[in-house]
Amino acid sequence: MFNIVERRRWYFLFSALIIVPGILIMIYSTATTGAPFRLDIDFVGGSNYSFQYTADGPTEGDIREVFRNLTGDEVIVQQRGEPSEHKWSVTAGFYDNDTQEAIRESLAQLGPLDEDSFNFESVSATIGHEVTQAAIAAVIVATIVITGFIVVAFRQVPNAFRYGVCAIAAMLHDILVVMGVMSLMGIVLGWKVDALFLTAVLTVVGFSVQDSIVLFDRIRENIPRYLGEPYEMIVNRSIWETIHRSLATQLNAFFIMIAILLFGGDTIKQFIFIFFVGLLSGTYSSIFIAVPLLVSWEKGEIPFLKGSGTLHQDAEFAEA
């Protein structure tokens, strides 16, 4: 039987090669833009205009000049979809009704504007602040609940607290991967973090923890079943007994998301891509991060954390 956990240092190195550049990208984004991601109006507040021309219309500079002349503001102008579709999106500040109407009329003078495509939405900075606080609180509460649940569910297993910590470590691994990818896409493609991004992150958290718990549960079942075997061997056996189940479940989701990425609408592709990356990371981290961390902790390989050296398989646990 191939020993998966034996090569755990390579898995940790591979993850570091993904996470560390992601953190550096977020630092660079913060230094250049003031935030680790490009934030949508869901977080910073403001107004968003989206519109489309039926034929060749204005350039990015022409659209920016309209807003500059009417409001004096420097706005963010982005082209959506293919250039031949003539779709535009503008993120700006708050304006009164008269200014909004003047903006629409000025944009219509630049080319054949599709009046039905002209949409306007506004979000206050207060609401954006509340969304950010709610997202942070949700991740913190999820972390506490997950740790508590695993400790209670695995209370008959020696060092049950380790299982909760390793599941959280794998979850944080996935969050950092998703955040790094999102920061990179913001720099390269101008993607912005919105409420759907939070939905993707929280869903990834759920999938990641679920996979880890499935593997941990098999380890819990196998410890009394294979008393006397080295802990690493028990863990490796547990991975092989559950890996087909995890991969089969995730592959179904991967195929669906790939189909949506290829044939779905532009408005949902960003969400699906981030979800896909997170789910891929979650599948990897459950097998190659969460479980190997347990073995490293057991063997005392993690700095400042004392391992057991050998698994405590006492008579009381054997009877349980």
Image: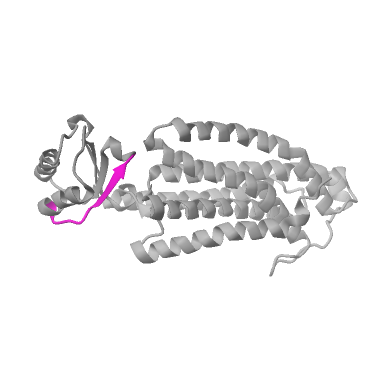
- Asked which quadrant contains residue 204, the reply is top right
Please state if 310 lies on the left or on the right of 171 as rendered.
Answer: right
Q: Residue at x 36, y 64 (%)?
A: 32
User: How did the renderer colour the structure?
Assistant: one colour
Please state if 21 lies on the left or on the right of 118 as rendered.
Answer: right
Q: How many marks?
A: 0
As for residue 156 lying within the magenta part, the answer is no
Q: Is residue 245 above or below residue 28?
A: above
Pick the front one: 89 or 279: 89
Pick the front one: 126 or 10: 10
Q: Residue at x 64, y 57 (%)?
A: 14
Residue 235 x, y percent position in the rendering: 78, 49
Which stretch did the figure color magenta?
Answer: 71-81
Please state if 289 lies on the left or on the right of 73 as rendered.
Answer: right
Q: Residue at x 38, y 52 (%)?
A: 132
Q: Residue at x 16, y 34 (%)?
A: 112
Q: Residue furthest bottom?
A: 304
Residue 165 x, y percent position in the rendering: 64, 55
Q: Is residue 176 visible?
A: yes
Q: Quadrant of the C terminus?
A: top right
Q: Is residue 74 above or below residue 284?
A: below
Residue 166 x, y percent position in the rendering: 66, 54
